[in-house]
Amino acid sequence: MMIQGDLHIHSYVSDGEASPEEIVKYSIKKGLSVISITDHNTFLGSLSAILKTGNTKKLLVIPGAEIRTLWGDVLVLCQTPIRISANPLILRDEALKNHCLLIPAHPFDVLRLGVGVRSKYVSLWDAYEVFNSSSDLLSNLVSFFYLRNLGKPLLSNSDAHTVEGIGSSRNIFEVSEFSVEGVLEAIRRNFVKPVPSYSILSTIFKLRWGIRIKPFSKNLKERYELYLRLGESHPHP
Ligand SMILES: [Zn+2]
């Protein structure tokens, strides 16, 4: 079975604009069957989406987070949240113990923190995000040409911070079963094809997101309640 997914999305649990529920709604609308809400250093966004919607027949939500490690940003995708660490080697151990995937995010982005040349430590990583719709074209080209021949699965994700950007880049997974483990296994076996793209609409909304007045976010109260509800029930940095 072929399904489409975007595995790098931010909710208002970190610096995104939308709630996890809104992200679920838009993802279904955009024809995605699997997503991961990868907020910075927390699995809360994904967990909240799963709690609200369950993992339904329409959309799978993979528990995920974007971890700021000492080397750069790394996506973690798991069956269940793990204890996170800024030390990539400790993170690797935790990921191995829990059958998670570690994926360098936007590895060669010049403006954001990517793992860069350490992406070539192939035993540490399970796949590479070689295209990120929120990165510039040159950074994406460097990532692709540097990493394409290492025998690892290649992914393209939106890194959306607003709902308009969701699915602007996506992947096609060939899964044997429609489940979180089915998608993780498809990545491990390299049954995945990246479908990279930039969307003009999502770029416009990203610019608007970039200049908003962040401390007075309208979602602050909801976000605070979410932390109270879920914050103590899962491993945190
Ligand atoms: Zn991100």
Image (spheres, rainbow, N blue to C red):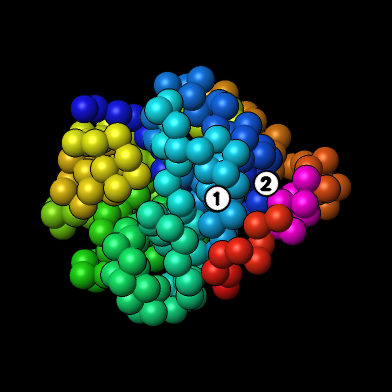
Task: Identify the image quadrant of residue 203.
Answer: top right
Residue at image coords 30%, 34%:
178
Magenta portion: prevailing SS class: helix
Estimate the spatial distance between the alpha carbons at disc 2 and disc 1, rounded to whole Å: 13 Å
Element type at marker 2?
loop
Disc number at residue 12?
A: 2
Counting from the top left corner in percent of width and height, residue 183 is at 29, 42
Magenta residue check for 75: no
Return the residue found at the far right.
216
67 sits to left or right of 130: right
- Quick one: 105 or 79, which is closer to the camera? 79
Amino acid tagged 1: Leu
Residue at image coords 61%, 64%:
233
- Quick one: 172 or 149, which is closer to the camera? 172
Quarter of the figure with the C terminus: bottom right
Q: Is residue 202 visible?
A: no
Q: Is mark 2 within 8 Å of ligand 1?
A: no
Magenta residue check for 226: yes
Q: Is residue 43 visible?
A: yes
Q: Is residue 21 above or below residue 112?
A: above
Residue at image coords 58%, 69%:
236
Counting from the top left corner in percent of width and height, residue 56 is at 45, 32
221 sits to left or right of 98: right
Counting from the top left corner in percent of width and height, residue 159 is at 50, 43
Of the two numbered discs 2 and 1 on the same chain, state the one appearing first in sequence. Answer: 2
Q: Is residue 83 above or below residue 9?
A: below
Q: Which residues are magenta?
A: 222-228
Element type at marker 1?
helix
Disc number at residue 47?
A: 1
